[in-house]
């Protein structure tokens, strides 16, 4: 009787171990699967993938911005995705992100992102541009305009905010995506040699800084 008991219990233990292994494998597989990124240029290391796709076609703006397209005012939106395949939450310092553009052979400049307020100002209250201005003086930050905020401004500011990145922390095995805006003053050719630079990202649970990301936009699909 005792040998039969141990034989049955041994079979049950084997079945339980097999079930647990199968469940762990399935959970790991499902956790690892994220929707594929819509991408043109990307860089990946330490569990984080940064994907960037410039919006250079006016049609791309119609759904979110309707008639008041930032592109018409020389402002380019970059569709950015931060995909976290690690077990750590990752915080991106959005304020330090730069779009590095080459204005000449010996003149590279890093453009800061525009806020949704600055996008609305730039579209509805554009600063006149001198067509004879040298590229060495090209990217001038958009300052806050003194004009009042009417309904059009409010709607455009909200559209830019809603389409933007919804935060700065990427949860484990999740993707954070949205638009970031840069004032190229309509000179889209600068994107042909531009780099999207993310100098600061931190894995929060392990308190580990990640190496910088430098996404080469010249390698995007055309």
Image (cartoon, rainbow, N blue to C red):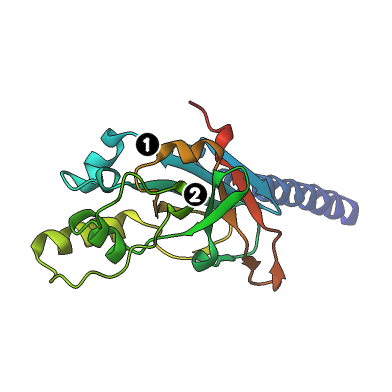
Task: Specify the farthest residue to the top.
Answer: 222
Q: Residue at x 30, y 49 (%)?
A: 130
Sequence-first disc among 1 and 2 = 1
Any part of residue 17 in sight: yes
- Asked if disc 1 and disc 2 are in contact, CB closer than 8 Å, the reply is no
Q: In front: 200, or 143?
A: 143
Give the spatial CA distance, label 1 vs label 2.
17 Å
Q: Quadrant of residue 137?
A: bottom left
Label total for image: 2
Q: Secondary structure at mark 1?
A: loop
Q: Residue at x 22, y 40 (%)?
A: 62
Q: Label 2, on which residue?
A: 81
Q: Residue at x 28, y 36 (%)?
A: 58
In front: mark 1 or mark 2? Answer: 1
Task: Please state the horizontal and vertical placement of residue 35, each as a whole percent of the image.
Answer: 50, 41
Label 2, residues with CA under 10 Å away: few <14, some 14-19, many ≥20: many
- 71 left or right of 180 in image: left
- 58 left or right of 31 in image: left
Task: Please state the horizontal and vertical placement of residue 115, each as a whole percent of the image.
Answer: 35, 64
Task: Please state the horizontal and vertical placement of residue 92, each as a whole percent of the image.
Answer: 55, 64
Task: Please state the horizontal and vertical placement of residue 26, each as a whole percent of the image.
Answer: 63, 44
Q: Quadrant of the N terminus?
A: bottom right
Any part of residue 29 in sight: no
Q: Residue at x 42, y 46 (%)?
A: 79
Q: Label 1, on which residue?
A: 56
Q: Secondary structure at mark 2?
A: strand
């Amino acid at each position: 009787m005792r040998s039969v008991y141990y034989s049955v219990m041994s079979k049950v233990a084997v079945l339980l171990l097999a079930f647990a292994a199968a469940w762990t494998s399935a959970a790991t597989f499902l956790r690892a699967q994220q929707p594929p990124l819509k991408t043109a240029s990307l860089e990946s290391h330490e569990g984080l993938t940064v994907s960037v796709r410039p919006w250079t076609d006016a049609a791309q703006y119609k759904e979110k911005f309707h008639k008041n397209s930032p592109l018409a005012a020389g402002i380019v939106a970059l569709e950015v995705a931060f995909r976290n395949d690690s077990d750590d939450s990752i915080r991106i310092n959005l304020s330090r992100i730069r779009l590095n553009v080459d204005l000449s052979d010996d003149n590279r400049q890093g453009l800061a992102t525009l806020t949704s307020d600055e996008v609305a100002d730039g579209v509805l209250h554009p600063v006149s541009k001198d067509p004879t201005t040298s590229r060495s003086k090209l990217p001038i930050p958009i300052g806050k305009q003194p004009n009042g905020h009417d309904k059009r401004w409010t709607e455009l500011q909200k559209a830019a905010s809603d389409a933007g990145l919804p935060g700065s922390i990427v949860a484990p095995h999740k993707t954070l995506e949205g638009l970031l805006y840069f004032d190229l003053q309509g000179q889209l050719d600068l994107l042909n040699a531009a780099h999207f630079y993310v100098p600061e990202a931190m894995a929060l649970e392990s308190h580990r800084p990640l190496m910088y990301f430098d996404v080469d936009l010249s390698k995007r699909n055309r």
